[in-house]
Image (spheres, rainbow, N blue to C red):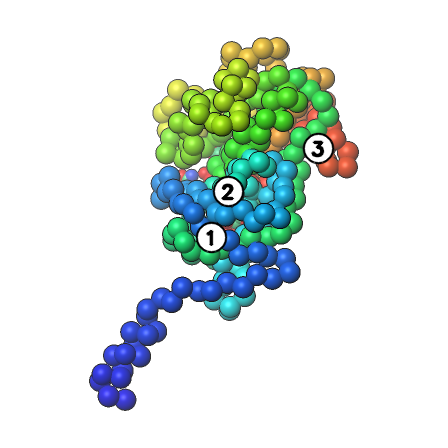
Amino acid sequence: MSDHKAEAATLASTTLEPIVLEPTAALTVEEVLSVHHWNDHLFSFKITRPASFRFRSGEFIMIGLQGDNGKPLLRAYSIASPSWAEEIEFLSIKVEDGPLTSKLQKIQPGDHIYLGRKPVGTLVTDALSPGKRLFLFGSGTGLAPFLSLIRDPDVYEAFEQVIVVHSVRTVADLAFREELESQLAGDPLVEDQALLQLTYVPTVTREDFHTTGRINTLIDNGRLFEGLKGEARLVPESDRVMLCGSMAMNKDIAAMLEGLGFVEGSNNKPADFVIERAFVG
Ligand SMILES: Cc1cc2nc3c(=O)[nH]c(=O)nc-3n(C[C@H](O)[C@H](O)[C@H](O)COP(=O)(O)OP(=O)(O)OC[C@H]3O[C@@H](n4cnc5c(N)ncnc54)[C@H](O)[C@@H]3O)c2cc1C
Ligand SMILES: NC(=O)c1ccc[n+]([C@@H]2O[C@H](COP(=O)([O-])OP(=O)(O)OC[C@H]3O[C@@H](n4cnc5c(N)ncnc54)[C@H](OP(=O)(O)O)[C@@H]3O)[C@@H](O)[C@H]2O)c1
């Protein structure tokens, strides 16, 4: 091969052609609309919503890109936007060397992404029996399904108070903090309800902050209940809880709830609390 041809071949192999994704029976292909990087290990993005796509606020779905073997590389993601939204939003971790997120973190507006056709999940109000206070306990990206629920007017119809608790290691991990601190000011549908009914409790466990300590600590020492109506403890008669975090957090808080008399619910059998893993591991 001549020097010129060799140079052209090298260039062709290093120039990235946009990968064209094809829809399948289980997946549609959507367009990335916007991307926001919160820090080195967290980002959020919005994609188009197909007209036929229906989901309940709080559910998760498979999303992905093309893997190195040419097949879809998919992972479960909680939908962070509410069921009425025109666009679909996600909050994502960036795992160093993670098969999907090492690629996903590089997406740009205009890129294409796979979206599953069948959303599922237990973090839905259908899986809870009626109550007065709804506590949403999330750690890390476990905030995502709660971002969906707190922007859904039905949640404020079903519960008098909605308390979203976000536990993270560092202040920079408090994604959507401003929006949550403002009680969703400017939200087209729930602004008025959120102002009266939504409480945001961020807690940072590995840096100084106004609130520190894991969620179970905030329950134990009563900090969680400051400013709320009702008792300064969790009561199974009128409180309902959704949990979304690491397996360790889910396990520890579920054990605490069961100790207090809370019964785990499901889509088929609504009860006092529901759980979903924010990730496996
Ligand atoms: C029901 C469900 C819902 C999920 N929703 C989300 C979501 O909304 N946002 C999101 O970023 N991820 C979510 N995940 C995790 C997601 O499916 C992937 O694991 C994640 O995108 C990393 O993919 P990966 O291929 O890069 O690495 P993987 O091989 O999938 O993961 C590698 C390791 O990274 C760690 N890890 C993975 N995900 C996370 C995370 N979210 N936070 C902290 N550590 C993590 C774990 O230790 C894991 O073993 C969810 C998982 C489940 C089961
Ligand atoms: N967030 C980061 O700064 C960061 C950066 C790079 C990589 N990662 C990697 O990402 C993975 C997950 O990190 P993450 O920060 O998203 O999630 P995480 O480790 O689950 O921590 C998120 C929050 O959950 C709390 N928590 C952990 N276990 C708990 C339990 N059993 N009960 C109650 N609360 C509990 C943590 O408190 P404690 O702080 O007390 O544990 C923290 O406030 C890890 O493998 C990590 O190495 C994280």
Question: Looking at the image, which residue is at 63% across and 41% down?
Answer: 55
Residue identified by numbered label 2: 87
Q: Does label 1 or label 3 sit earlier along the sequence?
A: 1
- Secondary element type, mark 1: strand
* Residue that badge 1 annotates: 31
User: In the rendered view of the protein, which quadrant contains the N terminus?
Assistant: bottom left
Q: Position of residue 140 (x, y in %)?
A: 48, 37
Q: Where is residue 71 drawn, in percent x and y?
A: 54, 66
- For the point 56% across and 49% down, the residue is 50
According to the picture, the residue beneath numbered tag 3 turns out to be: 127
**The one of 67 and 160 positioned closer to us in this rendering:** 160
Q: For marks 1 and 3, give the CA distance.
A: 32 Å
**Picture coordinates of residue 91, whole percent (x, y):** 47, 41
State the separation of the CA atoms marked 3 and 2: 25 Å
Front-most of 196 and 250? 196
Q: Amino acid at mark 3?
A: Ala
The residues tagged by marks 2 and 1 sit, at their Cα atoms, a distance apart of: 10 Å
Mark 3, Cα crowd under 10 Å, few <14 / some 14-19 / many 20+, is many
Going 37% across and 42% down the picture, which residue do you hit? 37
Residue, far front: 51
Amino acid type indicated by mark 1 = Glu
Q: Amino acid at mark 2?
A: Glu
